[in-house]
Image (spheres, rainbow, N blue to C red):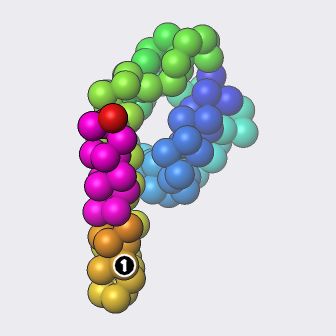
Amino acid sequence: MTNTIKAVRTALHLSQREFGERLGVSRDVISNIEYGRVQPKPLLNRHICETYGVREEYLSSGEGSMFAAEIRTIDLAEEAERIFRTLKPEFQEYALEQIRGLKALQDRQGKK
């Protein structure tokens, strides 16, 4: 299970600290789990699944898809927003122009 928890964290592009903060645990707890020094408690596993939209089957066995599809979309949007907020205003405007361009391209392709 330690490998699946690390896989989830890295798939979300979160540091151990960031991953743990949303779960209410320290970076050290996440580190100890990932290095196999301690086993996560069932309550923490459930919390990971609920917080990050991870499928319980994946977390316990590594089988199947990692995320429920609709939750993954939300996670991507949250990641994009988190990154966007760290950009300088001139880069925010550029990023928004790029997103608008991608949306227009998608709309044009959808009409074909």
Q: Which residue occupies 62% across, 17% down?
A: 62
Which image quarter: residue 100?
Answer: bottom left
Q: Residue furthest front?
A: 112
Q: Is residue 81 visible?
A: no
Tell me where residue 78 appears, x and y as whole percent.
31, 52
**Is 77 displayed left or right of 34 in the figure?**
left
Tell me where residue 102 appears, x and y as whole percent.
37, 56
Magenta highlight on residue 103: yes
Magenta highlight on residue 49: no
Q: Which residue occupies 53% across, 51% down?
A: 13
Q: Is residue 98 above or below residue 79?
A: below
**Is 16 displayed left or right of 107 in the figure?**
right
Q: How many labels were placed on the picture?
A: 1
Q: Nearer the viewer, residue 45 or 66?
A: 66
Mainly helix, strand or loop, the magenta region? Answer: helix
Which image quarter: residue 47?
Answer: top left
Q: Which residue is mark 1?
A: 94
Q: Which residue occupies 52% across, 18% down?
A: 65
Q: Label 1 crowding class (10 Å Cα cut-off): few <14, some 14-19, many 20+?
A: few
From which residue to which does the magenta span run?
A: 99-111
Q: Which residue occupies 61% across, 27% down?
A: 4
Tell me where residue 3 appears, x and y as whole percent.
67, 30
Q: Amino acid at mark 1?
A: Tyr
Q: Is residue 37 above or below residue 43?
A: below
Question: In the picture, which quadrant includes the C terminus?
Answer: top left
Question: In the picture, which quadrant includes the N terminus?
Answer: top right
